[in-house]
Amino acid sequence: MQRFVATLAMVLVAADMALAADTPLKGFSHDNTTDLFGYYLSKVEIRVGKFRLDSFDIGTLDDMKKYESGRERLPTYAPVMFSFQDTTSKQLTNENGGTYYQNEPRVLPTAYRLRGNTIAFTGTDKQVGTVTFTGTIDIKGLKAAQAGNNLSTDKVIVKGDLAIAGKVFKGVSFTWFGGD
């Protein structure tokens, strides 16, 4: 009888975990005390139609707190978002001589969750469509990169599954860039 009860308890726990995993992502939350700020760049080109993924961006802890409380909601920025380039739009030159595209849509979240070393994101943009991401962040690797003298690392810091307008990219790897 004890074995039956123990087995039943394990089955119920597993079922509860499966249901929780299938629960739709809602709201905006983070539990991190680690600064995850940066631009996360895909190790390979990711393209859907005319849109090329530029970066997966995470703001400061303060940005997240303000956004989550509803105090700072801008139509062009969120502390967790995906940035794209429309490669059919006009190509321009920045002050450093680098090129960029005139149309650079940002997919802002309809929901995100950063918990421990996990990231979940869903968002929609009228040009790009729906974007979802679930993955993990190598917090130890990120801290090492942030502590170094460089503003970037070639080491994989974020890895996960990305879907853009229904096209799925499994096991996408992102490096970290701390900005200029």
Image (spheres, helix red, strand yellow):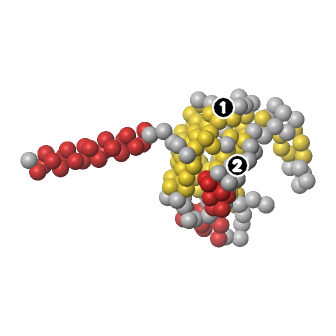
Nearer to us of marks 2 and 1 is 2
Q: What's the distance in space between the residues labelled 2 and 1, CA to CA?
A: 20 Å
Residue 179 or residue 68, whichever sits in front: 68
Is residue 76 found left or right of 3 in the rendered image?
right
Q: In the image, is residue 168 above or below residue 76? A: above
Q: Residue at x 75, y 39 (%)?
A: 105
Residue of label 2: 73
Is residue 165 found left or right of 99 in the rendered image?
left
Tell me the quarter of the picture where residue 90 sits. Answer: top right
Is residue 21 found left or right of 141 in the rendered image?
left
Q: Residue at x 44, y 40 (%)?
A: 23
**Which kind of residue does numbered mark 1 sit on?**
Gly
Q: In the image, is residue 136 above or below residue 101? A: below
Q: Give the percent coordinates (x, y) of residue 160.
A: 54, 46
Q: Give the percent coordinates (x, y) of residue 81.
A: 66, 46
Q: Residue at x 59, y 31 (%)?
A: 167
**Which kind of residue does numbered mark 2 sit on?**
Arg
Q: Give the percent coordinates (x, y) of residue 91.
A: 87, 38
Residue 102 or residue 173, whichever sits in front: 102
Residue of label 1: 129
> Can residue 176 be seen from the camera position used here?
no
Q: Quadrant location of the C terminus?
A: bottom right
* Mark 2 secondary-structure assignment: loop
* Mark 1 secondary-structure assignment: strand
